[in-house]
Amino acid sequence: MRRYLLANAIICLCVAFAAAAPAPSQPVSQEEALNWTRHLVPLPKKIEFVSKVEVPVSQVGIYLHSDKESLALQARKELHECLGTPPRQVPDASFILVLKIDPQESVLANLPNRDQAYRIVPMEGSSLLLVGGGPRGLYYAAKTMQQLLKAGPAGDRAQIPLVSITDWPDLEDRGFWGGDSSEHIRWMSDRKMNYDEQISTTGVDENKQCFVRYAPYKQRMIDEGPTYGINPVPVVLHLEQLGNGGVFNAYPELQGKDAKPGAICYSNPIFQDLLTQWLLLWREKPGVREVDVWMTENLGGQKSCQCEKCRKADHNVLEARVIVAAWKKALEKQPDLGLRVLTSEETEKSNPEVFAELPPEVKVWYYHSLFTYNASEKPMIRPYLVEAARKGRWIGVCTNACALVGCWQPFTGAHFMHYRMNEFVDKKLCGYLGYAVPRLHHVAFNAEAAAEWGWNAKGRSPHEFAVSWAVRRGMKDPEKFAEWSDTHGPVAWDVYGSEWPAGEKRGVPGKVADLLKQGKLSDLGYVLWEVYPTPWGDIKTVEQLDRDVAQAKRAVRLALELGDEMFIQESLAVQGYINSLKALWELKQVVTSDGVAGPKKQTAKQYFKMYVDSLDQTRKALTAWEDALPAKGGRAGIMRESVKLVDGMIGEMTAVAAELGCSPQ
Ligand SMILES: [Zn+2]
């Protein structure tokens, strides 16, 4: 097969190019190979450097076998852009890149996610064959080639490795939803991500006409996505939250009887008809092939529709039936319309029954605002989901790439991301739908880590990923950055995995200042109802707490040595958090519901001061961290809410200290 490929390619080359002297190849040292590899993200599954050539960029020819596929054309275009050469034939080429799509290629034919798989193979006569199992595979081969070219010297000469690569992704779909992801389509594409979702406005106007639309920044997902191999998938918002789109103005009868405002009566055929129309309206947009319908998120303890028909059945099952029926109706007009369904905390208890309603081709995003939006170090994918995936159901997960959703924090979490992505791959999930918020640039490291391990979960260690990330950013001392990442990342993970400080925003189990005073602070490692870990659910022992305190101190020192303000401030913020927890733990030992015994007052004063000083350090660092981010993107001052929360915590603890007669001097 390989011989056939080579012969085939060479015949074509003779047509396209006049004979030219091949560039002489030179050996590649181990160090060079390693450096080249570190410029690649994600790391290819199999890679071997054979030799290298150096040629004028003007003598690099790019030959594309077929120009029928837009992604193949885009692959060629991006390679020309990367070389800085015009898209033209090169008669005197001394090096040739041959681009080809061949699903039957002997190796690619047997790989998982073949459409996205690719090979890069050195050929005789100073050329490389880039072959994709599908258009996306070829596009990804070109992405890898671009990363290799960019690693070399800039200017009018290209250093090209003769490299042998066989590569394919672990997860079929890799992408983000919401935030400003739709404004980072090329960024995602360059890291071989292929999926984006945005909530759409879906509604009914005053003439009872259905409409769908996007704000301009979300529209970019549809306008740019297909060009860069990103599937744009519009979202029909959680169905109980559709009210603002005029649905109930046009059809008041759709409001569920004796139900939470917004909850829909699924026994009324009008709703199914509206959903069919919304699905079809989205499918009409160029590049849109699928729609994701988000199931009701939360009835907040209130009822679903209590009409004669609805109340007899599980409302989640009814909802699933209506979604499927609407989609099937839409299929009559658009037979290739794909459907995805996103679960929620409302559907969680009924998910197995919901899945039973969904035809096998309907893809499921598993989401639950507590179970999939957290940073706790415990498995996320429940046994019933593993079982459904094992039986062949397409299941992906919608989860946070940031530290804490709605309580923004700096988080360079290589170990966290490695742990999460490996669980998803090990449990045979098909997709990753990350939530990279508030803005992608706030979580750029974790977002890139998702691209890395969603493609190749068993490739790089957290340390090696950090080194490669630093190399790609041109940092002076990548090993030191990785050392910082290994030192700081696990501490930050313990803090955020314990929902510190986000847990302070919840009513359960209450604010730590109150709990301390009442003698009700939990023990280390305690997680209320297995979902509320605040303040130290992911810190199991005093030894772990003390180790984190020591590591945080070392991380600050390493960050100062790195000299990068962004990492200095992140380190200071996390050190403030872990030190505040250390102080809180010591306070728990001396404060009882009866107050503080006389001989212990001095100790209490010392630790009240430590708590307040530590959070004050965090408070300052959060703002300084945002200021130090390389790209602002959107409005600044996004950390204001987190700063306010920490401010409040300082005030609450200061008041308790005063009440107990233990105000720090
Ligand atoms: Zn009803």
Image: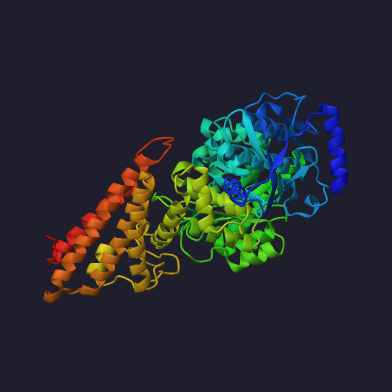
Looking at the image, which is closer to me, 239 or 192?
192
Looking at the image, which is closer to me, 232 or 261?
232
Looking at the image, which is closer to me, 247 or 655?
655
- Position in image of residue 471 (x %, y %): 51, 46
Please tell me how many numbered marks the rendered image carries.
0
Say which quadrant the C terminus sits in. bottom left
For residue 381, say whether it is visible.
Answer: yes
Up the image or down, 57 lies above or below 320; here it is above
Question: Left of 224 or right of it: where is 520?
Answer: left
- Position in image of residue 659 (x %, y %): 14, 64
Image point (53%, 61%), residue name: 419
The colour mode here is rainbow
- Position in image of residue 1 (x %, y %): 87, 49
- Position in image of residue 543 (x %, y %): 36, 73
Looking at the image, which is closer to me, 246 or 48?
48
Q: Quadrant of residue 120?
A: top right
For residue 638, say whether it is visible.
Answer: no
